[in-house]
Image (cartoon, helix red, strand yellow):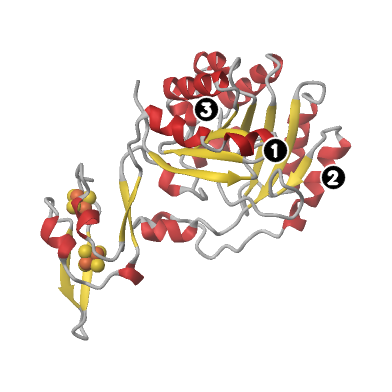
Amino acid sequence: MKIPLITEIQRFCLQDGPGIRSTIFIKGCPLHCPWCHNPETQHTEKEFYYHSDKCVHCGKCVEVCPSGASTMETSADGKPVLNINRSKCAGCVNMSCIEACPTGAREAVGQQLEFDAIIKEVISDRPFYKNSGGGVTISGGDPLLFPKFTLEIAKKLKEEQIHVGIETSCFAKWEKIQPLLPYVGMFLVDIKSLDPIKHKETVGWPLEPILSNIQKLLESGANVRIHLPIIPGFNDTNKDFEAYVEFLRQFVEYNIHGVDALPYHVYGESKYRFLGRHDEYQFKNVKNMPAGNLKPLVQALKAAGIKKITIGGMVGMGGDKQKK
Ligand code: SF4
Ligand code: SF4
């Protein structure tokens, strides 16, 4: 079984499912949404953050790098400058530069943990889950990129009587999703757009399998909560809102647990910079979307009979969801 790299196991989460939860962020996602707030979870390979404000230009990382990915140069005004050429970085096994850095200016993104260590870590908060009706959410990235691992984690946690949530785009073969049904208490599914052309062009993969999987989940009696990330200039028009309402209206009688309308926020931008990928971030001058912009969508969903709708996540109206 391939165990993905884990970027973080975040404790005391309140927005990734019911109650107090621990969220396992796995590294790797099939989609490439240009607004992604967790770019460190997009690629399956190890990466590192470079925090320039902590760098003292000691050159230790340059000395240990086997690929010549870092060089120390001098600026026009005589100051030392560290250049990092990520295309040369082989993400060497031990990431020697991180070990060598005395100030924490380099930080590894993605840890290879043992299966048992992951389980041990998340079950340590069992009393909090029990008292709050919470549990563990597997997020990312997308857990369905590693279906065997996700299934084994879900099985083990179910055995431990811990509620399991999965946060996913649902872009996977149904055969990878179906085995999860007995073990997963809630599927938190993102729908990026209901326009098939826009979806394919922007996130790189077709919409149809996602909608078909959502339908199958609901028809199977799974508990599904829908996430609608609303992105300026991509899916924030009345036409987009109407499409969401019409699509979700047909599932009112099913086990749809609710809908979270998630306004775009800028919190992910600094991560692109730390990863040396700021050039690819297309939302540089875009501001946080006011929660009020989503009120027409919420009202229309309510009128269609959908219950338990939030703006910003499950903890309630008005807050901003930090992840995804
Ligand atoms: S991870 Fe390895 S190859 Fe990449 S910059 Fe650091 S030392 Fe060099
Ligand atoms: S080892 Fe750390 S502090 Fe020294 S030059 Fe490299 S990144 Fe900067």
The image shows residue 294, relative to residue 70, as above or below, that is above
> Where is residue 36 drawn, in percent x and y?
51, 48
Secondary structure of the residue carrying numbered label 3: loop
Secondary structure of the residue carrying numbered label 1: helix
Whether residue 83 can be seen here: no
Report the image quarter containing ligand 2: bottom left
Which residue is denoted by mark 2 in the rendering? 299
Which residue is located at x 71 percent, y 43 percent?
Answer: 314
N-terminal label among 2 and 3: 3
N-terminal label among 3 and 1: 1
Name the quadrant of the C terminus: top right
Which residue is located at x 11 percent, y 61 percent?
Answer: 63
Mark 1 vs mark 2, CA separation in Å = 29 Å
Which residue is denoted by mark 1 in the rendering? 132
Whether residue 125 can be seen here: yes
Which residue is located at x 42 percent, y 26 percent?
Answer: 146
Query: Label 2 sits on what residue type?
Result: Gln
In the image, farthest residue toward the front: 127
Which residue is denoted by mark 3 in the rendering? 171
In this rendering, would 322 be left or right of 62? Answer: right
| Eye-nearest disc, 1 or 2 | 1
Name the quadrant of the N terminus: top left
| Eye-nearest disc, 3 or 1 | 1
In the picture, the disc for residue 93 is: none
Q: 252 or 96, which is in the foreground? A: 96
Query: Label 1 sits on what residue type?
Result: Ser
N-terminal label among 1 and 2: 1
| Contact, mark 2 vs mark 3 (Cβ under 8 Å) | no
> Where is residue 141 drawn, in percent x and y?
47, 38
